[in-house]
């Protein structure tokens, strides 16, 4: 399955920009007429990561677009509740909302993995199109039911394929490695003989340094950079087939959502949509720069062979098809039906030429 990452949909970005401009024109006088509505919101991320920065941009946009009528008190990982407890805190009203990642609730909602990220079944444009025009947003809300209100609130391009001090050119090369990863990719690697562990971000690099881990993957290049992966691993692998794109989510307490005036509801949604553009573009550019830094630091950048990539995707399809959860299968069916019409069209539009900007 050949995939080519392209630019995000121009039409969606344009509509976001127009809506941002229209809603941002709220006069200052209106803001002073009422006491601002203040929401308490937390992320599961440290402040230094792009994931938290995306939430900061969203919060700032709401203040601007509402003319000060609504403000967000934003907290980072652990400041109010532990990172993995944000969903329950929002549902129960401890938090008014959470700017988080659906992958943290797969224990409660197995289908959440399909909204948190996608393997390279999709390219980035396809995942975005399925979410906004192919029924993804509606299915996401259906998964959560009436426990929370949910909107896409940020988007990231591919993670790296992993870090190691060993050459990996086929799936069997993972055999015997103590490897840090999560979700279904971890299940696949376990089946080929890796010893898979799940560690929080701050423990990964020290474990590689001590030798209690042999290899690992965590996030996108710019997220990996400040953690110091390049200081303890010789090889950095691409592409990140296990997560070629992902979404951040905004989850809102239903009572707080119901209490919000209709125009502020539209502003919250518009800021979330704008957050997809803000996060994706800024984050992606920083990822490009991070890879250049890795090269300058002496890291060897290696691509997985095409045959290996195909085997990985085949195994992901088998895993997805075998999932027992009915909601997982409903969402997966929606994605497959979308891909049946999307992938052939992208093949027609694939450009088989390159532009040499170094001339």
Image (cartoon, rainbow, N blue to C red):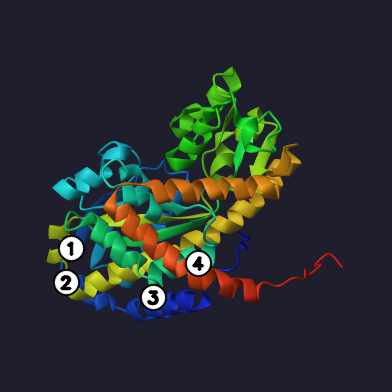
The reply to whether dot 1 and dot 4 touch (C-beta < 8 Å) is no
301 relative position to 22: left or right:
right
Q: Which residue is mark 3?
A: 20
Position of residue 115 relative to residue 223, above or below, is below
Position of residue 334 relative to residue 77, above or below, is below
Q: Nearer the viewer, residue 186 or 308?
A: 308
Q: Which residue is mark 2?
A: 261
Q: Quadrant of the N terminus?
A: bottom right
Q: Which residue is mark 4?
A: 126
Binning the other alpha carbons within 10 Å of mark 4 as few (below 14), some (14 to 19) or many (20 upward) gives many
Q: Position of residue 38 (x, y in %)?
A: 21, 58
Mark 2 falls on what kind of element? loop
Mark 3 falls on what kind of element? helix
Disc 4 versus disc 2: distance between alpha carbons?
A: 33 Å
Task: Determine the residue positioned at 38% across, 61% down.
Answer: 333
Q: Earlier in the sequence, mark 3 or mark 1?
A: 3
Q: Position of residue 325 (x, y in %)?
A: 29, 48
Binning the other alpha carbons within 10 Å of mark 1 as few (below 14), some (14 to 19) or many (20 upward) gives some
Binning the other alpha carbons within 10 Å of mark 3 as few (below 14), some (14 to 19) or many (20 upward) gives many
Q: Earlier in the sequence, mark 3 or mark 2?
A: 3
Q: Position of residue 192 (x, y in %)?
A: 55, 32
Residue 34 at least partly seen? yes
Mark 1 or 4: the one toward you: 4
303 relative position to 100: left or right:
right
User: Which image quarter: residue 266?
Assistant: bottom left
């Amino acid at each position: 399955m050949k995939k080519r990452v392209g630019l995000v949909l121009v039409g969606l970005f344009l509509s976001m920009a127009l809506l941002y401009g229209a809603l941002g024109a709220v006069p200052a006088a209106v803001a002073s007429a009422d006491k601002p509505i203040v929401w308490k919101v937390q992320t599961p991320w440290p402040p230094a990561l792009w994931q938290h920065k995306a939430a900061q941009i969203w919060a700032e946009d709401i203040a601007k677009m509402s003319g000060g009528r609504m403000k967000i008190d934003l907290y980072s990982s652990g400041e109010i509740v532990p990172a993995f407890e944000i969903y329950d805190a929002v549902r129960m009203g401890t938090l008014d909302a959470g700017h988080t990642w659906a992958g943290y609730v797969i224990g409660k909602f197995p289908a959440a993995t399909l909204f948190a990220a996608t393997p390279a079944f999709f390219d980035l444009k396809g995942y975005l199109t399925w979410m906004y025009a192919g029924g993804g947003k509606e299915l996401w809300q259906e998964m959560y039911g009436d426990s929370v209100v949910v909107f896409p609130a940020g988007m990231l391009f591919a993670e790296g394929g992993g870090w190691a001090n060993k050459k990996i050119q086929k799936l069997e090369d993972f055999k015997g490695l103590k490897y840090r990863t999560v979700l279904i990719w971890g299940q696949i690697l376990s089946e080929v003989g890796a010893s898979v562990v799940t560690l929080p971000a701050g423990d990964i690099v020290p474990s590689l340094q001590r030798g209690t881990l042999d290899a690992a993957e965590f996030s996108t290049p710019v997220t990996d950079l400040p953690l110091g992966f390049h200081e303890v691993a010789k090889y950095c692998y691409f592409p990140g087939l296990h997560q070629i794109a992902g979404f951040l989510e905004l989850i809102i307490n239903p009572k707080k959502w119901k209490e919000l005036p209709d125009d502020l509801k539209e502003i919250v949604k518009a800021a979330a949509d704008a957050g997809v553009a803000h996060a994706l573009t800024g984050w992606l550019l920083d990822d490009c720069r991070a890879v250049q830094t890795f090269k300058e630091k002496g890291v060897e950048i290696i691509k997985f062979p095409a045959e290996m990539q195909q085997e990985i995707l085949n195994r992901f399809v088998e895993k997805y098809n075998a999932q027992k959860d009915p909601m997982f299968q409903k969402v997966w069916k929606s994605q497959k039906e979308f891909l049946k019409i999307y992938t052939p069209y992208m093949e027609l539009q694939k450009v088989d030429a390159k532009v040499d900007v170094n001339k």
